[in-house]
Amino acid sequence: MGKIYISEITREDLPYIHWVENLEEYWHINEHPGPYTLDEITDCFFPARRYPLHKQQRWVIWEQEKKMAIGILDVFDFNENEKSIGIGILIPNKNDHNKGFGKEAISLLIKKLTFDKQIAKVFALIDKDNAPSTYLFEKSGFEFRREQMCLNRIVNRYDKLL
């Protein structure tokens, strides 16, 4: 049995999502930097959005043993023609890093995304100076493709064919 599981957002998860979205050190990776109100988070993420219709979706990463939320997964920019989608992960507490949670969460997410055969490729956009994320995605089978602009900064794009 794994160390973590992932679930679609429920109403009970909204305070945790609100807290994560308002961590100022991560605002640069959002299209709309915080601060967010709980009402804005609720309007944006609840009920859970399906990626084919809304082009994005979020999941909560749960630590199995403690039954605690430890992070979030995001899918975005669903492209029906290319059967591709971007994925992102944020585990904000540094004490939860380097325990295999990130790699397991990415693996579980990819299983969910490929279940209905709508997705043939996933990609990640990683800040050039984010060595831990680069390492995580490379360890998860992603390969560097190119540099590209994203939210007024240059990021590295990593792809994984499924």
Image (cartoon, grey):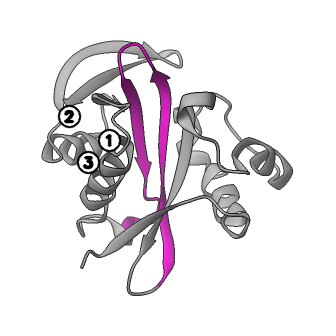
Judge the density around disc 3: few (<14), some (14-19), many (≥20) Cα neighbours within 10 Å: few
Amino acid type for the residue under numbered disc 1: Thr
Q: Which residue is mark 3?
A: 132
The magenta region covers: 67-94
Query: In the picture, residue 130 is in which quadrant?
Result: top left
Q: Main secondary structure of the magenta part?
A: strand
Q: Position of residue 57 (x, y in %)?
A: 56, 42
Residue 98 is at least partly visible in this image: yes
Image location of residue 45, percent across then percent down: 69, 47
Name the mark on residue 114.
Answer: 1
Looking at this view, name the residue that lies furthest to the right: 39
Task: Determine if the magenta segment contains residue 79.
Answer: yes
- 65 vs 98, left or right, is right
Q: Which residue is mark 2?
A: 162
Structural distance between the alpha carbons of marks 2 and 3: 23 Å
Q: Are marks 1 and 2 in contact (CB under 8 Å)?
A: yes
Report the front residue among 45 and 16. Answer: 45
Return the residue nearer the eye: 54 or 92: 54
In the image, what residue type sits under mark 2?
A: Leu
| Left or right, residue 77 beside residue 161 | right
- The x and y percentages for residue 80 are 45, 19
13 with respect to 162 (left or right):
right
Where does the N terminus fall, quadrant-wise?
Answer: bottom left
